[in-house]
Amino acid sequence: MSDAELVLRSTRVITPEGTRAATVTVSGGKITAVLPYDAQVPATARLEDLGDHVLLPGLVDTHVHVNDPGRTEWEGFWTATRAAAAGGITTLIDMPLNSLPPTTTVGNLRVKRDVAAGKAHTDVGFWGGALPDNVKDLRPLHDAGVFGFKAFLSPSGVEEFPHLDQDRLARSMAEIGGFDGLLIVHAEDPHHLAAAPQHGGPRYADFLASRPRDAEDTAVATLLAQAERLDARVHVLHLSSSDALPLIRAARARGVRVTVETCPHYLTLTAEEVPDGASEFKCCPPIREAANQDLLWAALADGTIDCVVTDHSPSTADLKTDDFATAWGGISGLQLGLSAVWTEARRRGHGLEDVVRWMSARTAALVGLGQKGAIEAGRDADFAVLAPDETFTVDPAALQHRNRVTAYAGRTLYGVVKSTWLRGERIVAEGVFTEPKGTLLSRP
């Protein structure tokens, strides 16, 4: 401990072994030790006594649409990473679509990295994209450091990122499986979507009917069958249909290598409470009923669902019209995801250790970032300091997102992020940010 540069002390530190009073030492941006609470602090080290505030590992959000370059008016690396830091997130992985160009070639990845350089308040990594015509680009992208490959099984909503039919899904999956890469999939079946009633207009019930559960269930079944046939690693993005859970459990029992995520909005918002015309609640797949939500929570508890990510998908306010059929589908959650999940988790009897497992440890493991996701010696000194029993009411004007449209407006949430630290440096505290200190990450 004599070489420690920074010491953080709290009566509640969440470690892989549990929550305890501890003293955490940091040197060179790394955690060097987790010691007893009353450990002596060397005179040369700076002590941060956090009192009873909880010291968490920084969250790792593996599903974020930054939209930069090309649609920077929707978000951008500067604003997205500020919002992330304000919400206790220290690492995010950027999705390949909604930026122009999309991250589907090595050249396009280079453009994305050049744009992000110097603007990131948190660490940032990148997903690649799997399109019908870019199989030849997948291995070069993997070698260039993307963390895996995003694909859609139904139209994505932007013309530059077309979806994969079953043949092209198999082709891309076989290529990615050849180097044991990870394929992450938006699983909704286009045929079921086309057959669903399409009324348009402001009624949320009509929008919900247009994105039925069986569209998700069929697509998940297709994905699992292909993964089993090819022995490929696959990840189901933003699961909202609880009806798909038995399919996933059965596939895992057969040895299929599948992981699953869900999102704060599916865990905290319900279809019954969405007002007509309130397209700030629109996302695809949609927010479903309360009974469905209960089953998602049960699947988190038993490990069927591995992790929770925001799927932060912003747009300009004018695209959030009161017609659910034409409004942009996406919910902005970077700054609020931790508090939203914690608010509902505590109501259901879960602890902060569970939230850390879902939003930090397992997300870091998903993308192979062994240096993230836990407070233990050798890991990056990435932290969030949380007052878990304090509440706040969501005011859109207080958000760091570029466009302050939120489905959480007016909701009272538990869990106030007091400060966020990246590799031993405080990057935000009480709304005051440092200059960007984030690093652009590549797959280990």
Image (cartoon, grey):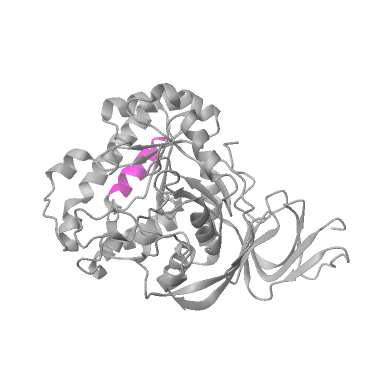
Q: Residue 212: percent from the left, percent from the top? A: 20, 51
Image: magenta residue range = 244-256
Q: Is residue 47 above or below residue 327?
A: below
State whether residue 177 appears in this view: no
Q: Residue 247: percent from the left, percent from the top? A: 31, 43
Secondary structure, magenta segment, majority class: helix
Numbered-mark total: 0
Q: Is residue 119 above or below residue 152?
A: below
Q: Residue at x 39, y 59 (%)?
A: 332
State whether residue 80 appears in this view: yes
Q: Quadrant of residue 202?
A: bottom left
Q: Residue at x 84, y 67 (%)?
A: 41
Q: Residue 28: percent from the left, percent from the top? A: 77, 51
Q: Residue at x 37, y 30 (%)?
A: 228
Q: Residue at x 39, y 24 (%)?
A: 135
User: Which quarter shows the C terminus?
Assistant: top right
User: Which quarter shows the N terminus?
Assistant: bottom right
In the image, residue 248 lies in the stretch drawn in magenta:
yes
